[in-house]
Amino acid sequence: MPLCRGIILQTVAFYIFYGLYMCQCQENYNNSVSLYRYLFNEERYVPNIIPVCNKGENVSISIDIALRELVELNEKFQLLRLKIWVRLQWTDCSLTWSPDDFGGQDRIIVPYGTVWMPDLAMYEGCSDEANMPDMREYRANVMSDGSVRYNFPTIVTAACRIDVTYFPYDYQNCSLTFSSWMYSGALVDIQALSSDGDTDNFIPHNEWKLISLKSDKKVSYYSCCPEPYPKVIYYLVLARYPKFYLLTLFFPCIIVSLLSLLGFMLPPVSGEKISLQITILLTIVVFLLLVQDKLPSSSDTFPYIGIYFSISMILVCLSCVMSGVVMYVYFKGSTKEKVSPWIRRVFLTGLRRMLCVSESPRLYQGEKEYDQVILHDIKPLHDRTQQKTTPTPPYPHHEVIGNGMRVTVSCNDIPHYKEGDSDSLQGQTKNLITNDWELLAYVLDRLFLLSYIAFTTANISSFFILMGNKISSE
């Protein structure tokens, strides 16, 4: 019996408290309905009319922007997409009441079109849908003293002038201008709640770093209207993270440019000097196209990295020309044309020693190594019956007379041949002898190599110096 009596008492107490709660809720609902009918009576309040109660006064609107997320920054089309929270606050002199007359209720939340709303516009907006989408989808909070707060999230698309001069170490400064589109400063004044925008809830971006979000108020005059139009401008400063572009664009281009050095190291007889340089040239063109697709087509500024790629492409083109010159000079010896005396004096004597080019390079034929010698003179013998003679040391130059030819050589070991093997001797001598044109080709190849290294080093150093000055100035 005591257990049953306790259960009955608890049940009765529950229903009593529940009834009191429902009565309180019904009373609050009735107070809200009464307050709503009192405030928004059509004879008392018209939401389409600006709430200016006294002559000469205006409505002061305070605005604050909270940056939530950087959705996208399209450099090529110079568009900025942001997810922001817009916070508006103003005073409506027609929406005041005494909370005691309505059960102590000091606020009421109503839909967008119920109260007067400022025709706020963002000047840089270029969205196809709306200037600030979903602005009309939320509710306003009206206080008993007439202050109205309207907060809403939106995703805005704004035009932003992109400066990619120092890409990928560039800073972008985008502005968001908010003002009333129709009301002049005589009716509506707009000002920022604080000098800094709210960035406490910002979600970090993987490519851009948020530097600052500052606000400023300005007054503009337009040719259409004599009245002043106040506006609040938010300046958004972003800095790019450069690591991704350095690893995927810049350093690969440096490595490819350095591969051009191999083209100068290949011997002319390999036949791969020009083909290697052309392959490297095509690779740098691909890198330049990647940069072009990423950045805007602007005639005002051009990125230094684009200038670097262009200079690298020019240097590789010059290396192709240099390789062609070297191969032309190398094979010019087959024409039996003599080297000019001034070329011999400048290149084969002075410049060769400065560049440390050996006068007698080593030649490898099969598994046997021979000393290359310089061809001085090859003259056919009219008397094909002349007897073969064999030179003996210690003369520095030896004259070997074969069947139909005389070869003056400078070496220690002379290939042995049998009488009648003139064709074999001629082919072997051709492989072993390097004439003046071949030596000139080696000198030019060494000269072009050092020139290419100097220009490439200057190109890379200039880029890093410019980027370093930009970073230090920031």
Image (tube, rainbow, N blue to C red):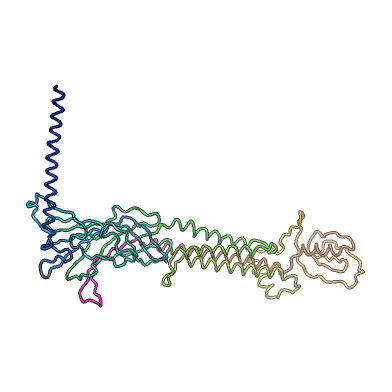
Percent from the top left, x then y, of residue 378? 81, 70
Where does the C terminus fall, quadrant-wise? Answer: bottom left
Q: Nearer the viewer, residue 351 or 209?
A: 209
Quarter assignment of residue 207: bottom left
Task: Looking at this view, name the residue that lies furthest to the top.
Answer: 1
Residue 231 belongs to magenta span = yes
**Image position of 261 (left or right of 366):** left
Q: Please identify the quarter of the rendering in which residue 423 is found.
A: bottom right
| Residue lying farthest to the left in this orientation | 101
Q: Nearer the viewer, residue 291 or 117?
A: 117
Residue beneath the point at 74% across and 65% down: 434
Q: Decide if residue 185 is on the left or right side of residue 163.
A: left
Q: Is residue 220 above or below residue 469?
A: below
x and y percentages locating residue 407 in the rendered image = 82, 67
Residue 94: x %, y % from top left? 12, 62
* Camera-side residue of 419 and 119: 119
In the visual, does 444 lie left or right of 402?
Answer: left
Q: Quadrant of the N terminus?
A: top left
The residue at 92%/69% (across/down) is: 385
Tell me the residue at 73%/59% (across/down).
363
The answer to if 61 sits in the magenta stretch is no
Disc tally is 0
Quadrant of residue 370 within the rendered picture: bottom right
Residue at left offset 24%, top offset 72% = 220
Q: Nearer the viewer, residue 248 or 472?
A: 248
Tell me where residue 84 appears, x and y as whole percent.
30, 58
Q: With 170 as the anchor, is 13 left or right in this view?
A: left
Q: In the rendered structure, which segment of residues is drawn in magenta?
A: 217-237
